[in-house]
Every structure is written in structure tokens, then in C-alpha cells.
Image (cartoon, grey):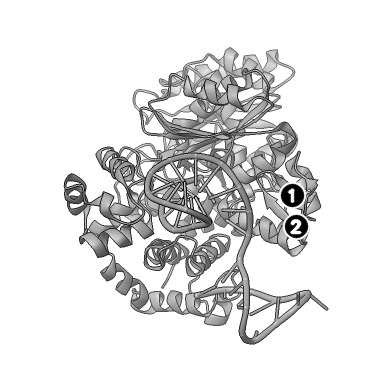
Amino acid sequence: MVTRGEAMRMLAELVKLTALDEGSPQAFKVRAYEKALAGIEGHPGDLDGMTKSQLTEIKGVGNSTADKILELGKTGKVAKLESLREKYPPPFLELTKIPGLGPKTLKSLRAQLGVEDLDGLKEAVAQQKLRELPGLGEKSEEKIAKAIERLGLHGKDRRTPLVEVYGLARSLAQRLEDVDGVEQAEPCGSIRRFSETIGDIDIVVATTNPAAVSETVLAFPEVSEVVGAGDTKTSFLTREGMQVDVRTVSPDQLGSALMYFTGSKTHNIALRQRAIDRGWLLSEYGLFDGDDVVASETEEAIYEALEMQFVEPPLREGSGEVEAAADGELPELIQRNHIRGDLHYHSDRSGDGRSSLEEMIEAGIEAGYEYVAFTDHGEDLAINGSSREEMLAHRDRIRQLDAAYDEIKILFGCELNIGPDGDLDYDAGFRLEFDYCVASIHSHFDLSVEEQTSRILKALADPSVNAIGHLTGRYVGRRPGVELDIDAVLEGLAVTGVALEVNGALDRLDATTDVTRRALAAGVDLVIDTDSHHTIDLVRMGYGVRYAQRAWVTPDRVINTLPLDGFLDWAVRRRG
DNA sequence: GCCGTTTTCGGCCCGACTGTTTTCAGTCG
């Protein structure tokens, strides 16, 4: 028994430990493990029961990695990994989190000074022994001393939830666009790929006046400490310890710079390989044939020159998109303009709702929707929910408003609460009064896998339920989701025709990319929603769509891309 | 460790910045 997740964790640990062992994160063996990791990530099915020859068909997985996966399945361990773990015990690994300390320096610290852990390093620093090592000096010693002090605040492994940095990144970029000579400023990196957690903020600035950009950056009130400042790159730390890198390029190099700084690393390496195959060179400054520029101004031009389809940023994870784009086989991805309605939508009928029905309807029209379903909380969610009487009065108002607005269809829905046993609000008859229901969990996060799975399965079997909202109830970086037998849940969804929600709230982003990808493979319908509680939350539809793109979601699999009639047919099908 | 219409062996992405250096190594992305 070996799951994809287990194989990926094994490889991720091998990447880390082998980089130390080889003395370089660029060592070929390390890169081979990285490629295998990306290959497995992009492989939709589970690994269970796969033979060696089937495993080696996965991109990047060769003989040796296949053996390790089989070994892991058979014995629960991998000998190679065990011996590396012994060689690099956890206290020593802690040291790799210190910015500025790479494998070479660590090796030398251990061999020359006997440093085995953080305390040993602190002592060596206190005794000013580091400056005696070859390649290190007084400044390096001071830098490391400083890095130790703030370890934990922003170690190299620290990832911050997207929700905590998205606004800051946009705001910094907007302020840079106001600087003289700046044509465009874009947050790139994992933010642009819409990864749910972020290492640091990368901003690419197309400008004719890089000095003015650097000057502006250094004067930002967010700057707590300047990490580096060169001709083209300015880096600083915020008080929260988030690193921000601002790179300037000339406007005619914007495309190659965006591409380069958006990554991912694996995607970039694959693209550069394609350039090399054609006798060219690809860098952040452009695609070059000797001294001649083949393309550099737009990303589209570069992909075209490399004879590939354009790859949307959320797809650029090195999990098969380069090959697919080269073969012209990228799917038609879901886009924001495919979405015709929002089906998880609160008004101030909910205790935690902040905007009125009218305000939410106007906002929906503004967003270009053909329909919305108000899904205020049911009675089981004590403070935020509504009694039957309140719901019926609410329905009357919704029907009146629906009659009053020609440009949008307004549906009477409910967000049902899934209780610990899978029970739902009201009674079966009352629940069928709603035009549409999304059922979600809001409490009891600590039940066993079996209990969580069966409560979801029971809820989705109810004929009033059209979709399961925020499947795991996670808050990115704050609260882990409930543990579920995902395969069993997906099978239940596929059999009943209940949709799986991709919730666009940045702190939820639930279902996750991995679950969504598996849902597609299992034939499950999807719905992309905002879970809006205020008119300002409607921007989440764009987030939900971009997050869904990471799972290669196509519009034909998303029920709220259907025109109103088609959607209503889909919704009533369940109710018979 | 992986991979192959120039290869089953010999390759494997590219550049900025810093600190240590008189031409480069280490780290980072």
C-alpha cells in the first residue's frame, strides 16, 4: 500500500537530504528526484498496485525511484532514506533553515568545527570561529548570527498562506506602477501561479528607469530590513518576515521576465531545455539565437517560438503541462468569463452575512451573472442560521425580488449544515422546498476518518443536496481539514451526481487541487463558488477559477458554466 | 538518478548578488 502522497513525501525528503549529501541542490541526483516528484504529482491515479514497469512510465521515474516506491509499499521504509536520515539527524537539518547557510557551508561547519545543531552553531559564532573557515569572513559570521536570531520568523522553509500576502503583493505592484518610467508591475512567482502558500513575493517591473523603482522600493513603509540592492534587483523583509524581491527589466523584455519569475522552477527548466534543443538560449532577458532576439516582449511570443501552446500560470508546475503544450493537447481551461452564476451566496439573512439581498443582487448583476442562488445558513447553525418561519419569509422576499429583476434569475437556496452524524437542517420535506442546496461541515473537525467519511456520504445521499461545500473545512495555514477517505467520497459524488465545490475564498481554497484533479478523473461534477458574505467577496470567483485551473479543470465539468435552463435541469434532476 | 530521431554513455538551465576574492564560490531563485 503506497499512496501518491506517501511517495511524494518520500521523494521530497530525498531531495532535501540528497542536496545536503551531494553538497549542492543542483546536483543531478537531486534534480532527478525533483523531476520524479513532479512526475508523480502530475500523475492523476493512485500508485497502489502498480508494477515496476508501470511506475517507470511516469515521467521522471526510472528504475531506482520505482524500486524505492515499491520498497516503501512493501516495507513501509526505504533503506536509502533511512541511511540519509541517520547521517543528517533532525537537529542538524534545522540548520538548513537558516538563510545564507547552504550545503557547502554546512558541510564545512560540521567537518571543521564539529557543529551538529543550533546550539553548536551559536557557540561557534560566539567564539568567532566561523570567520576562520575558508570562504567565510567577518561579514558572513555577522550575517549568520543575525539569521539565527530571527530564525523561525522567516526561515527558508517558511510558507505563508496566499490569503495573507495577496493583498500586499497587489498593493506594492500598484504603487510601483505609479513610478516614473514604469509601464507595468506584476506579482509573479507562486502568487501568479495561485499556489495556496507563498515563499516570498516576487514583483517584476517593466521600466525605463530602474533607479527610480529601486529608490521607491527602499522607501516603502513596509521595509523592515534591506536584504540586497543591486542594479536590477531590490530585496527587503517586511516586519512579518516576508521577503519581497523586486526585479526591473526593460519593457521589451517583460514577457521573458514574467515567464522566468513566474516559474515554477521545474517549468522553467523544461522550457530552457526546449530552447537548447533548438540551439537557442532562454533567460529572463529573452529567447536568443546567438545575439539575435527570437522573442522576449510577451510570454505568448516565447511559447509560440518554442512551438507550444500558451500555458496559463496556474498550470506551470512541471506536472506534464510542457509536454501537453508541445503536443497541442492542453485542455481548454475554465476561465472567469465561462461562469454564469454563483451558487454559494449569503445575504444578511445569515448571522455572518453583511450585505442585503438587494446589494448582493446588484453586485451579481454587476459581475455579469445570469443567476445566483442565495444559500443562507440553515437552522442548525445556531447564531448564523434561520428558523423555518424566517426562511419562508426570506423565500417570499426572494420570489418578489426575482420578479422585480429581469436581468438575473434569483434562486432560493440554503447552505445546509452537515452534523456530526451526517444529519441536515430542518426535515426532508422542508429541505425540498429550496431550489438549490449546498451542504457543508462547520464543526466537529476531530472525528475519525471513518466518521467524517460516513457523515459526508450520508449528507450527499439526501435528495435535497446539490453540492458539497468546502469539503474539508480547512483554513489554509490555520486549521487542517478533516481527514476523509477521498476515494469513497468521490465515488459517492459520482454516483449521486452531487457536485464538489471549489470554494474561492483565499483562506479556504477547498476542495484542494489534488482532490479536484481526482474528482475530474472520477467523473464528479464541479461548482466554483465565492461563499460571499459581502459584496466585496465577489472577487473570489476569479480566485476560485484560477485555483481550479491548477487542477486542469475544463468548463464542461463546471455546472455553473451552464446557461440558466441547463443549470435548472441539472439541479432538479436530483429532486426527481 | 534519468534519459535518448544527433546518444544505452555522457550529458543534465541560467543569472544576480554577496563576500571573499585578485577571478571566483556559495547561495538563492
Task: Name the residue carrying label 2.
Answer: A280
Note whether A155 is above or below A43 in the view shown.
above
Q: Secondary structure at mark 1?
A: strand
In front of the other: A363 or A463 = A363
The image position of residue A553, as x and y in percent, is: 64, 48
- Amino acid marked by disc 2: Trp
- Amino acid marked by disc 1: Leu
Which numbered disc, 2 or 1, marks the residue that appears first in the sequence?
Answer: 2
Specify few, some or many for label 1: CA neighbours under 10 Å numbering under 14, 14-19, or 20 or more: many
Residue drawn at 72 percent across, 45 percent down: A286
Q: Quadrant of residue A223?
A: top left
Q: Secondary structure at mark 2?
A: loop
Q: Is residue A302 left or right of residue A463?
A: right
Cα–Cα span, label 2 and label 1: 7 Å
Q: Is residue B26 left or right of residue A368?
A: left
Look at the numbered discs 2 and 1 and tell me whether their residues touch, using CB distance below 8 Å: yes
Which chain does the residue under circle 2 lie in?
A
The image position of residue A305, as x and y in percent, is: 80, 52
Identify the disc placed on residue A188.
none
Which chain does the residue under circle 1 lie in?
A
Using the rendered image of the protein, determine whether residue A199 is visible from the camera's viewpoint: yes
Quadrant of image for the N terminus of chain A: bottom left
Residue drawn at 49 percent across, 23 percent down: A533
Q: Is residue A220 left or right of residue A112?
A: right
In front of the other: A257 or A47 = A257
Task: Name the residue carrying label 1.
Answer: A287
Quadrant of image for the C terminus of chain A: top right
Tell how many labels.
Answer: 2
Note whether A361 is above or below A62 in the view shown.
above
